[in-house]
Image (spheres, rainbow, N blue to C red):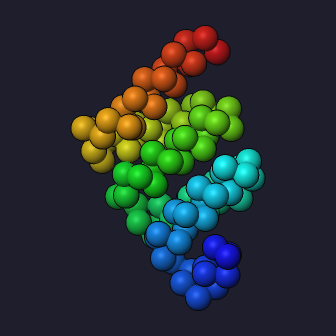
Amino acid sequence: MGEAALKVLPDQPNVLFSLANALGKAEKWEESERTFLHAIKVNPNNVGMHMNLGVLYHRWGKLKEAESAYKKALQLDPNNQTALKNYNMLKGRLKNA
């Protein structure tokens, strides 16, 4: 359904965000990443986009990319508690990697 919506609204951030999250939950990593990156291109200052891209990379095992995405989210909103919590969890994994 999300892909059909994108045919009508190809640059609608909410549609892109929802589709990217759904693809990530289905472990369709590459498709989710492409969709998040497109969403970020459309809306580069959206904290949630960067944070959720970080979550995708974190789950995918791309820890350096996750770190970069979380840092960008925190640069945009240093008080974002979810991004901060996720970043701190990631730092623990990076130490053990």
Residue at the limit of the structure toward the bottom, as seen here: 8
Residue at the location (40% across, 61% down)?
Answer: 44
Q: Residue at x 57, y 31 (%)?
A: 64
Q: Position of residue 62 (x, y in %)?
A: 65, 34
| Quadrant housing the C terminus | top right
Whether residue 14 is situated above or below residue 71 in the rendered picture: below
Q: Quadrant of residue 83?
A: top left
Of 41 and 35, nearer the camera is 35
Q: Is residue 65 visible?
A: no
Q: Position of residue 20 (x, y in %)?
A: 60, 59
Q: Is residue 1 above or below residue 69?
A: below
Question: Residue 18, relative to residue 92: is it above or below?
Answer: below
- Of all residues, the one furthest to the left in this rendering is 79
Q: Position of residue 65 (x, y in %)?
A: 57, 38
Visible in this render: residue 63? yes
Q: Is residue 56 left or right of residue 43?
A: right
Residue 74: image quadrant is top left
Q: What is the tally of numbered marks visible in this picture?
A: 0
Q: In the visual, does 69 lie left or right of 73?
A: right
Question: Quick check: 63 left or right of 29?
Answer: left
Q: Residue at x 46, y 70 (%)?
A: 13
**Residue sitting at x 52%, y 63%:** 17
Q: Quadrant of the N terminus?
A: bottom right
Q: Quadrant of residue 87?
A: top left
Q: Position of residue 5 (x, y in %)?
A: 61, 81
